Image (cartoon, helix red, strand yellow):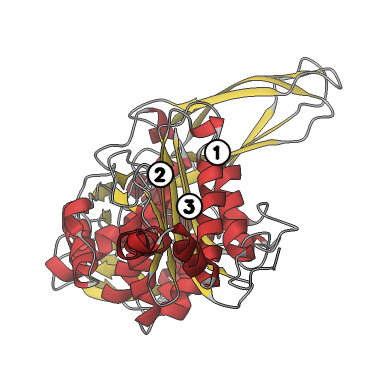
Amino acid sequence: MDILKHKLAISWLIAVIVLAAAGATQIVSTAETDPSQLAEQQLSEDILEILDGEALKHALASVHVRTESGEEIFSYNGDTSVVPASGQKLLIGAAALDTLGPDYRFSTGVYTDGHQTGNVLHGNLYIKGYGDPTMLPEDYEKLASEIAAQGIKVIQGDLVADDTFFDDMRLSLDLSWFNQRRVTGAQVSALTVSPDEDYDAGSVIVEVHPGENQGDTTTVEVYPETDYITILNDVVTVEEGGSRSVDWGREHGNNNIFVSGTMPLDGPRWRNWIAVWEPTELAQDLFYQALKDNGVKVQGGLSLGETPENAEELIVRESMQISELFIPFMKLSNNSIAEILAKTMGREVYGEGSWDAGLTVVNEYLENAGLDTSAIQLRDGSGMSHLNKIPTKEMTRLLDHVKGEEWFDVFYASLPVAGASDRMEGGTLRSRMGGTRAAGNVHAKTGTVTSKTSLSGYATTQDDEEIIFSIIFNNYIGSHPKNLEDEIAVLLAEFTYEMEDN
């Protein structure tokens, strides 16, 4: 059984020791009169059969299962520290709800260190971000229109972007160069912008459409529209039915985004979310353009700086409560929100908007929750790091602990639901476990990075009892074994202590 530890094995060993003198018949008789042990033994055997498959031959598998009372019923490498991928968001989410509270709101404010005479503002205009990932292009437009509504037509000073609520470390320590161009590795800034209501802060949407005729260069659209992004387009329109192949990237250190390849005349658009370099300046550019569109002229330049303590507040825009933000955060496994929550906890608790401070807060929460933090390593908020570590036994301990928190309903409602087709209900589990007893039953957080995958959450058995589980596979070769996670989750949903008589 390797590191397999579960209640039946312990009970069986005690029975062997105590009843050895009485003979095997009495031992078998004891097992036969304990249907709960037989049911758990069968569950263990079924899970072990899945773990013994070819897909995990060279991998590290870790599985831990608890009853709704917190009692361990299955453990396979449960004490081994493994990489949870986006299962990391369970730790960040729990700590954020406890530290910031479900009612916490982010804000973005506009301030001035000058005074207004008529329609002229004598001084600088500051736009300061407090980590809000829900700022959309239209929100910057609304802020600009409100400035204009205050009668300001000329700003005799600079437009200053203030992102000092967080530190200036844009990328977490272990993020690879390959992922820095991707929305999953977007830079983190306290003043940022999201292109849509998934709130993928620090990214833009790039679309490629076929030209009118074969041989034409394709049309590329960027949202939000901005001169801050330069598109290098080398995608050519080819004949109907031709190959649709688009390569893309963003140059390191700037916002030259290149696309190349072919797009058939009858082909659908190609669409992607691409991380920008320095999102603070993208947000500043959008606000500057919105001011211009609303008839407000900035006579100075665009600069970065810190808002003076005595600056006058002109406008403050608040986000939704994080209880609402948790839906796109957890359902869609939004990395930007995760990293922003981490830095926000650091700022609010220790006055430092950094990963170090934020992850210290998370670690303290986990320790207070009764987890063995000596076995846990925290490197980021999103789970992109391959150096995050947690044993599945500690993951289920956390999932058991949070059931007693006053914010648990928010936490539970944010988890993806197996087989639920609605994107904001099923989330990353919407196309998994459909047509099984797990569909609409299993509420769990997914996680995937290269060679690592996880699924941790809750399942309800046929006896209408809740089971808490964590499944983490590391170091597999080839395609991800998510099907094995699903098979185990289905077993848990199908589990019952009511064994049929043979």
Q: CA distance from mark 2 to mark 1?
A: 21 Å
Quadrant of the frame with the N terminus: top left
Kind of residue indicated by mark 3: Asp
Q: Is 365 displayed left or right of 195 in the figure?
A: left
Residue 456 in percent (x, y) is at: 46, 58
Q: Earlier in the sequence, mark 2 or mark 1?
A: 2
Element type at mark 1: loop
- Say few, some or many: other residues with alpha carbon within 10 Å of mark 1 (under 14 / 14 to 19 / 20 or more): some
Residue 375 in percent (x, y) is at: 21, 52
Q: CA distance from mark 3 to mark 2?
A: 44 Å
At x 32%, y 41%, the residue is: 385
Return the residue found at the far top: 215
Q: Is 89 displayed left or right of 379 in the figure?
A: right
Does 366 sit above or below residue 288?
below
Element type at mark 3: loop
Question: Which marked residue is nearer to the observer: mark 2 or mark 1?
Answer: 2
Kind of residue indicated by mark 1: Pro
Residue 154 in percent (x, y) is at: 36, 62
Residue 247 in percent (x, y) is at: 58, 22
At x 65%, y 52%, the residue is: 432
| Residue 1: mark in rendering | 2
Asked where in the image residue 126 lies, by quadrant, the reply is bottom left
Q: Name the residue tied to disc 1.
A: 481
Does 116 sit above or below residue 197?
below
- Say few, some or many: other residues with alpha carbon within 10 Å of mark 2 (under 14 / 14 to 19 / 20 or more): few
Kind of residue indicated by mark 2: Met
Q: Name the residue tied to disc 3.
A: 200
Does 251 sit above or below residue 166?
above
Return the residue found at the far front: 22
Question: Which marked residue is nearer to the observer: mark 3 or mark 2?
Answer: 2
